[in-house]
Amino acid sequence: MSTIWVDMLGVPFRQTYYQAGGYRTRAIECGDGPPLIFLHGTGGHAEAYMRNLAAHAQHFHVYAIDMLGHGYTDHYDGDYTMEVWSDHLLAFMDTIGADSACLSGESLGAMVSAWTAIRQPQRVSKLVLNTGILAPPNAKGKQELIDALERSKKAAGNLSIESVRARMAWLMAEPDKTLTDEVVATRYAIYAQPGMQQHMGKIAVSTLGRVVDDTWTAQWMRPELMQDIQCPTLVLWTRHNPGQPVELAQDAMRHIPDARLVVLEHSAHWPQWEEPDTFNRLHLDFLRA
């Protein structure tokens, strides 16, 4: 696969830091047009979308952000909840002057985007739920998420290129083909920041450790809550998605008034990276319709 720099050749992009709700927030942004905000998953960072920015910048002002507590965005001292992340996202939208925006979230980012569309429907013009939806995992999914939690703890507690690679391999259907040394080195550098390893352990427990807890999911991952989503919604899934299989997504999306499903066949939890051309085409077809 190509490098991040090759993917962005010729694209006028910038890395910017904004104050959002009092938190210094990193964004990689490019393009002109209506705002489109990409949100990564647990333990992730804006570089998850480097294979998608160029295509989308032809039609949108694109922001791939580091969510609160992730990447180079400030940390939060309290307990992380969907409301905390949603509040930060809304504050970011306020900062960039976006009364409304298209939101596209992957995994945790999808759940935060869904919560934002539920809480403030007028702020979300279109919504993409990429390999994450407000529905508790089944028994097999719980085991897959426990595996991700253990890999995350190892990457945070015993940081090495190998432990980061093992955690990121969980995201991919064919990591030998799609997991590049460059993106592993990028995440390693992010995790190597002072204090970041301990904080990533906190993030992992706050998300992966809780989505397998029935009490927590009863509060934060109830599918019927999605009946309050008012905007057109694309449920973008994969055949090999760990944690939440296609059948679970199909059942949960029935609660969304205006939702459609597409399934990518050759990716797992990072389709925007594993199948960028297919992802970009389907994603843009929905957003531009």
Image (cartoon, rainbow, N blue to C red):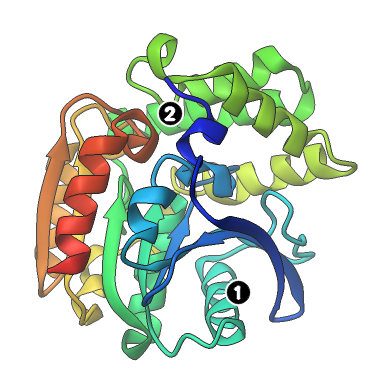
Q: Position of residue 205 (x, y in %)?
A: 62, 44
Which residue bears the numbered disc 1? 88
Amino acid type shown at disc 1: His
Which residue bears the numbered disc 2? 171
Quadrant of the drawing holding the C terminus = bottom left
Q: Is residue 246 above or below residue 62?
A: above
Q: Nearer the viewer, residue 257 or 12?
A: 12
* Residue extending furthest toward the front: 10
- The answer to whether 53 appears left or right of 76 in the picture is left
**Separation (CA) of disc 2 from disc 1:** 25 Å
Q: Could you say whether the residue bearing mark 2 is in a helix, strand or loop?
A: loop
> Where is residue 1, by image quadrant?
top left
Q: Position of residue 56 (x, y in %)?
A: 34, 56
Which label was assigned to residue 206? none
Does any portion of residue 135 appear in the rendered image? no
* Residue extending furthest toward the top: 176
Amino acid type shown at disc 2: Leu
